[in-house]
Amino acid sequence: MKLTVTTLASCVAALLALGLVMLYSATMTRHGADYLLTQMLWCGLGLVAAAIAAKLDYRLLAKVAIPAYFGAVLLLALVFVQGKEANGAKRWLDFGVRFQPSEFAKLALIVFLAWYGARYARHMPKFWRGMILPGGLAGVVMGLVFLEPDVGTTILIGAVTCVMLLVAGIRWK
């Protein structure tokens, strides 16, 4: 286990370092070190968030799975009402901070499907409870993301949903 964690941490550190070098070399003539410093700040915040997440008990996520799912659906629907358009697509919400609800929806759906698969593990081989119900709930998220339009994120959500349902125990047939 210790070797695995060390290997993973080393790979992440190497990719971060390589990404920072590439970013600096691509932007140094036009923007100096501005982008590099901003990216280093975000890398640091991400590493702190990852360390906090690693220390938290994962079972706490089960308590927020359903509210997170419905919150994600609400935010995705809110994009159509007061979303900001950029490059011909309405994908952004702006509440002082601009963000894409589809990014939150990806995480919320993963947590929800993991909770669903664990809670209803004995029903997963059944067609209705194992595939149609969770697939339909994932389909709501995919449909809202597709209408933004964001085809790439829709495909990613669909692929992750299929893999998660297969791991949870749905039948191949």
Image (tube, rainbow, N blue to C red):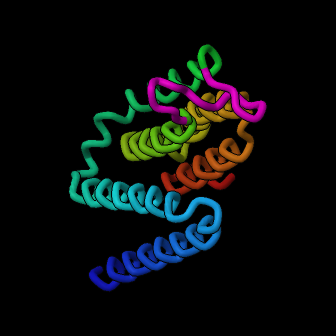
Left or right, 83 with reference to 71: right
Question: Which quarter of the rendering shows the N terminus?
Answer: bottom left
Q: Let me know if residue 136 appears in the view.
A: no
Q: Is residue 116 magenta?
A: no
Q: Residue at x 49, y 29 (%)?
A: 72
> Compared to 7, does 101 lie above or below?
above
Which x, y percent locates residue 115? 39, 42
Q: Nearer the viewer, residue 161 or 52?
A: 52
Left or right, 70 with reference to 128: left
Say how many tags the image has: 0
Which x, y percent locates residue 135? 60, 37
State the residue lying farthest toward the right: 88
Q: Is residue 97 magenta?
A: yes
Which x, y percent locates residue 66? 39, 30
Q: Let me know if residue 58 appears in the view.
A: yes
Left or right, 1 with reference to 151: left
State the residue lying farthest toward the top: 81
State the residue lying farthest toward the bottom: 3
Q: Residue at x 28, y 51 (%)?
A: 58
Q: Residue at x 44, y 39 (%)?
A: 112
Which contiguous range is marked in magenta?
83-99
Which quarter of the picture shows residue 62?
A: top left
Q: Residue at x 53, y 41 (%)?
A: 103
Which x, y percent locates residue 158? 65, 45
Q: Nearer the viewer, residue 81 or 43?
A: 43
> Compared to 89, does 37 lie above or below?
below
Main SS class of the magenta portion in the image: strand
> Compared to 67, does 45 lie above or below?
below
